Image (cartoon, rainbow, N blue to C red):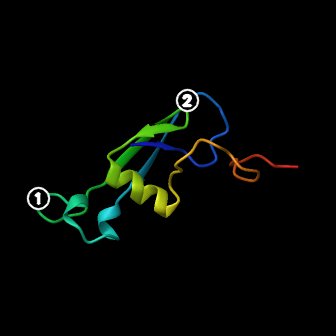
Amino acid sequence: MKIFQPGYDGRIGASSVMVQPGTEVDTSEFKDDYGKAILYRVEFINGVAKVPANLGKWMIDKGYAKKSPVILPGEIVGRATA
């Protein structure tokens, strides 16, 4: 699944976010063989990351990612809007 970084301002580069959905969602899909929550490092390249569908849906629901690259007024991080 392709997800988009919230507030991406068009600058070329990479950034990462660490998420651990298994601490909030009690399901085996986010846990290892020993039942511990998996820590995921999601790397956004130019505002886009490709992740498994279940992780992408969780990140979108929690606000760590967006479904669309469209930026609405006030979403750009670190820049003032007029």
Relative image position of residue 31 (x, y in whole percent)? 21, 61
Relative image position of residue 44 (x, y in whole percent)? 48, 38
Depth check, front residue: 40 or 49? 49
Residue type, mark 1 in image: Asp
Relative image position of residue 62 (x, y in whole percent)? 48, 63
Depth check, front residue: 41 or 61? 61
Quadrant assignment for the N terminus: top left
User: Of all residues shown, which one is farthest toward the top?
Assistant: 12
Relative image position of residue 28 (x, y in whole percent)? 19, 64
Residue shown at 35%/53% (left/top)? 55
Among the 4 quarters of the image, the one containing residue 46 = top right
Residue designated by label 1:
33
- The local secondary structure at tag 2 comes to loop
Residue type, mark 2 in image: Gly
- The local secondary structure at tag 1 comes to loop
Residue shown at 40%/44% (left/top)? 42
User: Of all residues shown, which one is farthest toward the left?
Assistant: 33
N-terminal-most mark, 2 or 1: 2
Q: Is residue 75 left or right of residue 15?
A: right
Residue shown at 34%/49% (left/top)? 53
Residue designated by label 2:
13
Q: Is residue 82 left or right of residue 47?
A: right
Count residues near mark 1 (Cα–Cα under 10 Å), then give few for <14, some for 14-19, many for 20+.
few
With respect to residue 73, does 25 lie above or below? below
Residue shown at 83%/49% (left/top)? 81
Residue 15, numbered circle: none
Mark 2 → mark 1, Cα distance in angstroms: 34 Å
